[in-house]
């Protein structure tokens, strides 16, 4: 569903938005919708990352450790043969 709303932007902002929309082959409305969705997702992901950090979880280290374990298991099972892509 689509809702029609009235918004106000500075002249500079609306000109930039029009330029980017045209460059991407989108209507101004579609481009603004996409920009708003992207901003919303960035806010959610930033808040999530902050919550994970406050919880003391180091996801990067955990991911690296997981990758290392996958490599060790592969080496044990396949004796150094290349992994399938």
Image: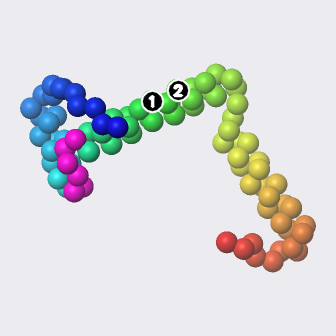
Image label count: 2
- Looking at the rendered image, the quarter that the N terminus falls into is top left
- Residue in the picture at 81% in, 77% down: 81
- Identify the secondary structure beneath mark 1: helix
Residue 4 appears left or right of 80: left
From the image, tell me which residue sits under label 2: 47
Image vertical order of residue 32 relative to residue 52, above or below: below
Say which of 48 and 76 sits in front. Answer: 48
Residue 60, given in percent of the width and then of the height, sits at 66, 42
From the image, tell me which residue sits under label 1: 43
Q: Quadrant of residue 58?
A: top right
- Residue in the picture at 57% in, 26% down: 50
Whether 4 is among the magenta residues is: no
Label 2 Cα neighbours within 10 Å, binned few <14 / some 14-19 / many ≥20: few
Main SS, magenta region, reads: loop
Residue 35 can be seen in this image? no
- Residue in the picture at 80% in, 58% down: 70
Residue 11 appears left or right of 60: left
**Is there CB contact under 8 Å for labels 2 and 1?**
yes
Image vertical order of residue 45 relative to residue 73, above or below: above
Residue 56, given in percent of the width and then of the height, sits at 70, 26
Q: Which residues are magenta?
A: 24-29
Residue 66, given in percent of the width and then of the height, sits at 77, 50
Image vertical order of residue 21 relative to residue 4, above or below: below
- Which residue occupies the extreme right position in the image? 76
């Amino acid at each position: 569903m689509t809702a029609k709303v009235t918004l106000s932007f500075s002249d500079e902002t609306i000109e930039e938005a029009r330029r980017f929309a045209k460059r991407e082959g989108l209507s101004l409305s579609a481009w603004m919708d996409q920009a708003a969705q992207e901003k919303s997702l960035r806010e959610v992901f930033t808040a999530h990352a902050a919550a994970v950090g406050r919880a003391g979880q180091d996801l990067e280290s955990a991911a690296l450790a997981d990758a290392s374990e996958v490599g060790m298991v592969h080496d044990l099972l396949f004796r150094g043969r290349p992994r399938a892509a």
